[in-house]
Image (cartoon, rainbow, N blue to C red):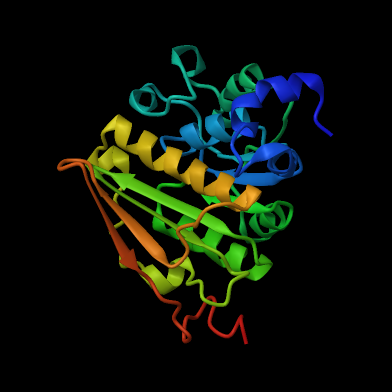
Amino acid sequence: MLNDQELLRYSRQILLQHVDIDGQLRLKQSRVLIIGLGGLGAPVALYLAAAGVGQLHLADFDTVDLTNLQRQIIHDTDSVGLSKVDSAMGRLKAINPEIQLIPHRAALDEDSLAAAVSAVDLVLDCSDNFSTREAVNAACVAARIPLVSGAAIRLEGQLSVFDPRRADSPCYHCLYGHGSEAELTCSEAGVIGPLVGLVGSLQALEALKLLVGFGEPLVGRLLLIDALGTRFRELRVKRDPGCSVCGGKHA
């Protein structure tokens, strides 16, 4: 049940007919893994904590650097040199002491990633490199756990939802194959701060829709964001029956 403090804390969200008391209880009972606590993971973690997701698993092996602070709004100047997980946990506990935080401070290998994914109901990939995204996707397909994937670099962003529970859903590999995306990071190419905030906020919104069960998630659709022209474009993405990751999983 929700206690009096929770009813008050989440009252504006509970007022929505798409959420209500039942939806808020589903959020309280949900377990979510956030991979990466940088530009994308910052708004994701902040909004999911504030929304009352009961258990947040936080994965990042990096430490806070001064160059992060232009966009990674969960960290501050006093956090420089600290583990990003510890920095984020301090901020999230201050925002919402009602939720449980599970830290993953070491880099996740194949086995530990599989275990971390299997322990949750939903994964949000907020990483900044292709190899990590491929590994996270493969683990989600194997465990049949939905994945909300976001990316942002320079002045361009992307967002999609991959749900291996659905026969019509592609996976990340269906879309990008073996490295069709350039191996550039924000430290090499640059990125504007509000763009990662926008993509991360949309990831958090998709997560809430999936956890509560309302609206139409971005399954089978790729949202492209052009920050320079403030334009949004949507592409339809189909599952590849011959995909080496998810092909045959729905047979």
Given residues 172 and 127, the one toward you in this image is 172
Can residue 186 be seen in the rendering of this structure?
yes
Residue 228 appears left or right of 89: left
Where is residue 61 drawn, in percent x and y? 56, 39
Above or below, 82 relative to 198: above
Image quadrant in which you'd find residue 233: bottom left
Above or below, 53 relative to 90: below
**Residue in the picture at 61% in, 19% down:** 95
Where is residue 215 drawn, in percent x and y? 52, 53
Given residues 179 and 176, the one toward you in this image is 176
Residue 7 appears left or right of 158: right
Above or below, 192 relative to 80: below
Where is residue 220 drawn, in percent x and y? 43, 68
Image quadrant in which you'd find residue 146: bottom right
Residue 71 appears left or right of 201: left
**Residue in the picture at 39% in, 64% down:** 221
Number of labels in the image equals 0
Given residues 73 and 178, the one toward you in this image is 73
Above or below, 250 relative to 194: below
**Residue in the picture at 47% in, 45% down:** 203
Of the 4 image quadrants, the one containing the N terminus is top right
Q: Farthest residue to the left: give it.
A: 229
Of the 4 image quadrants, the one containing the C terminus is bottom right
Can residue 178 be seen in the rendering of this structure?
no
Where is residue 245 drawn, in percent x and y? 53, 76
Q: Farthest residue to the right: give it.
A: 1
